[in-house]
Structures are given as structure tokens and as C-alpha cells.
Amino acid sequence: MADLRLSGVSKSYGTHKVLDDLDLTIQSGECFTLLGPSGCGKTVILRLIAGFETPDEGTVNIGERIVADAKHALPPEERHIGVVFQDYAVWPHKTVHENIAYPLEIAKATKEKISADVRKAIEQVGLKGLANRYPYQLSGGQQQRVALARALVTNPAVMLLDEPLTNLDANLREEMRFEIKELQRKTGTTIFYVTHDQEVALAISDRMAIMDLEGKIRQTGKPDEVYEHPVDEFVHQFLGIPNYIPFEIREGAAWIRGDADGAKALRLPLSPPSTFEGTSGRAGCRPMDILLDRNPAIEGGLPAKLLRLSLLGPIVDFLLDVKGVQLRAQVQTEEALARDLLVEEGQDCGIRFSGLRWFDENGEAAR
């Protein structure tokens, strides 16, 4: 196990600066996920750690050792890391055993050590009995396990995972994300995982960081902290489906700004915190934060009109109109049936909020 540290790292390609004075620390033994939109530079960070790229400025540390700076860089094979790529990168002409053994063969390990370590890695990833199969004889999830075992077999200080579940179907993605987390618990290996998949990040991370398209890290913290207390609208939007209600403050209360037809504004049933600065902004919530009721005059709520109802298996998704503001609400299907909430489209109803997050005109969250 080892800490990972990037200090003052910058990286450009031609005139395009991808990273600018970036600082990032991953603690030894944790599963750390870097989450961000495609093209934000998260894979560049992984490649800098792996040794496939060199920083223009700053340093990259694995443990106490500087493995790269602007003047020199250790080659990947000397960094004691394992890497798992999006496309598995397993050799089609090699068996499961031969694929996993390759890093040990490069390191000139003895045949006895190779046999013992490969057997252990195969068992760790749940491929016992498949050692002599070729990739074409394996499912996508099994091929991904081969890639994980190959990264684990040298007992690396750090494992780097670059969108390793993207090519799997939904069921396999769900299965494999728990497998990865379980592997991390068993081995204690430091894992640095880059993805744009918020569900994976929330499910497996000890800590996570949200990166924007400018290559800046907006927020770092435990998954529940980042999800429940986003520092700004960018983080709130990126983690889940967002709803926003434009408001203005009058006499300490928040009022929904009128619709395009100039309709009279409605008062929000919740008030902004005393720390909120400014006289206007947007109140944010997620679909599960909206509580639906058939009564348009529900106490402590707002009147709404149902525009669309979609049954999505375990949940029912509602598109609502509140004075020109469109909001999405979601209810567990069992609850919707039990409470008779399958409202007809065009019908009036009522909504309440389990909570709202208050953002100023600059998109910053109220502290």
C-alpha cells in the first residue's frame, strides 16, 4: 500500500492546457474515485501516475518516492503499480493463466512463484476452474476479472482503473463494481479509479473528487458528504438528476420567480438559510426529494400539474409543472401504487420537499 500525491501538476498538449497546478492526495489503502465528464483530464492524471505521460510542472509521488517531475520519470515497470483499462486488453492467444502470468514472466519470477501467485490471483477474482480457457470462451465480466487478476498478481502498491466497466452491460457493471470493492477490502491495495459513472463512484469510493471541464477539482470528500452537501451547482448537477427552482428573497422568504406569462409568484414552503447571500438564486433538489400528493392544496406544499408519468420498473418518474417551472419527481413503484399516486396526465396535484439546497446567482451553495 502507498499514498499517491500529485503536487502542483500541470500538463499541456500544444496550446491546450489540460491540468493547471493540480494538487491531489489519495491515502494509502483507500479506494479513491475521480469523477468527471468526458474530456476533463481525469485519464491524463491516471496516465501521469502510471508513467505513460510526464508532467510539464509539479511532482508525482507514490509513497515517499518521487516517480515523476518535469525533469525525469521512472518507467511504468519500476513504479509497482497495476493498471486495468476500459477495453480489458487481454491477449486473445493466451489462456487465462498465461494472461495473468505475463507480468511475473516479465519480472523473471521463478516458475514456482508464477504458478502460486497466478493461482492466488485467479481465486481472488473468482475465476477458479477457468485457468486454461481463452478469452473468446469467457464472458465480458470474466474477461474483466482476468484484467483485474493480471493487475493484482504482482501485489502492486497502487492499482489504477481507467473506466474498466464501461463496456459491460448494466447487470455486469453492477456485479463488477461490488467485486472491485470487495477485492480492495481483501487486498488493502490503494485504488485510484477514474470514471464518468456516478453510480459506480458512489458505490465503491471511500473518498471521491469531482472534476470539471476546466480540469479543476470542485469538491473532494466521502460519497455521502459530496452527494448531500455539494459545494456548487456543478457538483449537484453531476451527481444525479437535478431540479432547480429560480427564486427571489423578499422579507426573509423565498418566492418562485413568475413564469414567462408573468403569473404571480408562489412562496416556497422552505426558507433559505440565514447564511445565504444575495437576493436571488436557485433552489435545488433531486427527484426523490419531491413528495407527491393527489391534493393540490397539500399543507406545507405547492400546487402542481402532472405533464408526464413514466413507469421505469422499480420507480415511477413524474414530470411536473409548478408555475412554469418543470420538475421531475420519482417515487418507488410499490409506494406509488399503495398511495394511489398514478395520477393522470394533465391532472392537478400537490408537492412537498424533503429538503432544498440553496445556490446563489454564481452557483455557489449556501454555507
Image (cartoon, rainbow, N blue to C red):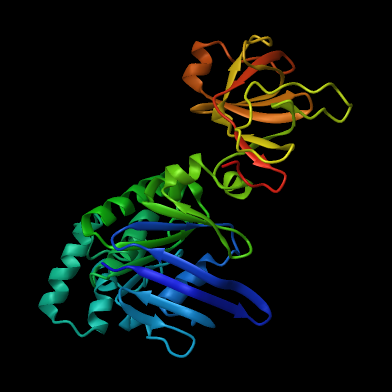
Image point (40%, 70%), residue name? 5
- Percent across and percent down for residue 147 are 34, 65
Foreground of the two, 8 or 336: 8
Against 215, residue 61 (above or below) is below
- In the displayed image of the protein, which residue is found farthest to the bottom? 71
Query: Is residue 2 toward the left or the right of residue 86 in the image?
Result: left
Residue 270 drawn at (x, y percent): 62, 24
Up the image or down, 290 lies above or below 103; here it is above
Residue at the farthest right position = 261
Q: Nearer the viewer, residue 185 or 228?
A: 228
Q: Answer left or right for 2 relative to 140.
A: left
User: Quadrant location of residue 187?
Assistant: bottom left
Count how many numbered circles sit on residues in the image.
0
Taking the image as drawn, is residue 55 in sight? no
Quadrant of the rendered image containing residue 180: bottom left
Q: Where does the N terminus fall, quadrant-wise?
A: bottom left
* In front of the other: 174 or 221: 221
Vertical side of 355 occupied by 279: above or below: below
In this rendering, the answer to whether 316 lies above or below 339 is: below
**Is residue 315 in view?**
yes
Quadrant, the C terminus: top right
Residue at x 30% of width, y 73% of height: 63
Q: Position of residue 305 (x, y in %)?
A: 73, 19
Between 247 and 53, the one nearer to me in the picture: 247
Find residue 120 and report its horizontal and vertical position in percent. Answer: 17, 63
